[in-house]
Amino acid sequence: MDKKTDPSRRSFLTGAAAAGALASLPAAKALAQAEPPGTVSSDAIKKEKAAAMDYHSERPLTGSVLAHEHDFDVTPNNRMFVRNNLLTPLIDINNHRLTLKGLVDRELSFSVYDLAKNFKTVSMQGMLECAGSGRSNYQPKASGTPWNPTGGMGCPKWGGVRLADVLKAAGLKAGAAHVAGQGGDPGMVATAAPVIRSIPMRKAMDENTLIAWSMNDEPLPWIHGYPLRLVVPGWVGSASTKWLHTLTVLDAPFKGTYMTNSYVVPRHAIQPGTKMPPEKVSTEGWPIKSMITSPAPNARFGGGQAITVRGKAWVGEGLVERVEISTDEGKTWQRAQLGPVKDKYAWRIFTYEFKPAGPGYVTFLARAWDDRGNAQPAIPAWNPLGYFWNGWHRVGVLVA
């Protein structure tokens, strides 16, 4: 099919700003060497990622880069963290449908092209982070993927349509309280529980919550949900269902593996090393957090050379109010300069200029505050699954 003359392709690309969406399909045959058939192999996914990516598991595939590999205003596709609960499906965009059902006035079904044709297309930069990001910092050890101390997050640019607009088109019945997204990722065995998470209606109707088909103005990579995914920025990554094919409007939170057994934290602080208590809550928005992206750990600087500390700060709900840097192990703190506010759920860039007094080893600590008065703790409260690590980030350098 000639991509220059095919009207359905042309209209989709014009509205979606996702050049090459259909051109991804010929590559599918080369990718379909994985087991089981109909999935994308881990080797094929890794070829599209930066060499700096550190992989933590193969099935499911998980991987991320360290903080100093995040020194970009917008996270490049090849540095976006990888987190699967199951396997990566091989999906033909031409056959893919998104179905809306449940507490709606009209059950609807859309192709990707239908979404681009019938709804306003938008783009925005938004933060996604695995709930277990930084898990390896916890002591005693928490269960789950051993994310490195600063791995498991990213802030790309997303493109698609607003979930709220699609829900309004279906019409919401009385009692509609949660929206559950179901992904098409298969398990290694047929009995594997499907990946289904739900979000409360207030978040579903947020204008920044998207049904996305593009990432950094390119089609979603296979590993990141091609051809459709939810993007629920600021919240734990598991809320942003990949390979999205069904949205179900419910009168209560969905009950299932990925809502009741995982992605939960104790309602109240517990003793480190103990089991998950009966009173627990589902993970939602990330607490205030920051990381230093430059200089890299153990970088070397000449005597008298000024050091520019750069980094990122973000929060799941609210605004980043300030970022502070300490060079004396937290005894005193100095304000960093914050970059401009961009999209609501994008990270804020910060910089701090430091002039060494003399040679030696200098340690920089970073902590952020949100607009509700919450500050990053030195060490966050322990929880059995190792979620929401947001302790101070530390980077040491040598001044000759």
Image (cartoon, grey):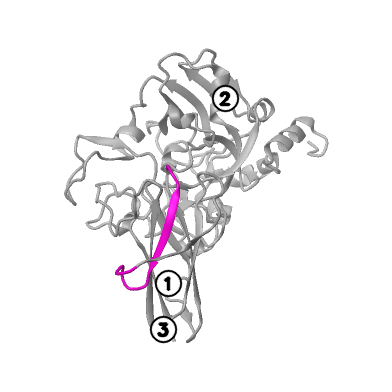
Alpha carbon separation for disc pair 3 and 1: 19 Å
Which quarter of the rendering shows the N terminus? top right
Give the labeled residue for mark 3. 357
- Residue visible at 24% across and 38% down in the picture: 267
Return the residue nearer the eye: 212 or 395: 395
Mark number displayed over residue 119? none
Return the residue nearer the eye: 38 or 371: 371
- Residue visible at 50% across and 45% down in the picture: 345
Return the residue nearer the eye: 247 or 370: 370
Q: Amino acid at mark 3?
A: Ala
Above/below status of 326 relative to 123: below
Q: Nearer the viewer, mark 3 or mark 2?
A: 3
Alpha carbon separation for disc pair 1 and 2: 46 Å
In the displayed structure image, the side of residue 56 where residue 231 appears, left or right = right
Mark number displayed over residue 166? 2
Q: Amino acid at mark 1?
A: Pro
Considering only order in the chain, which callout, 2 or 1, is on the residue closer to the N terminus? 2
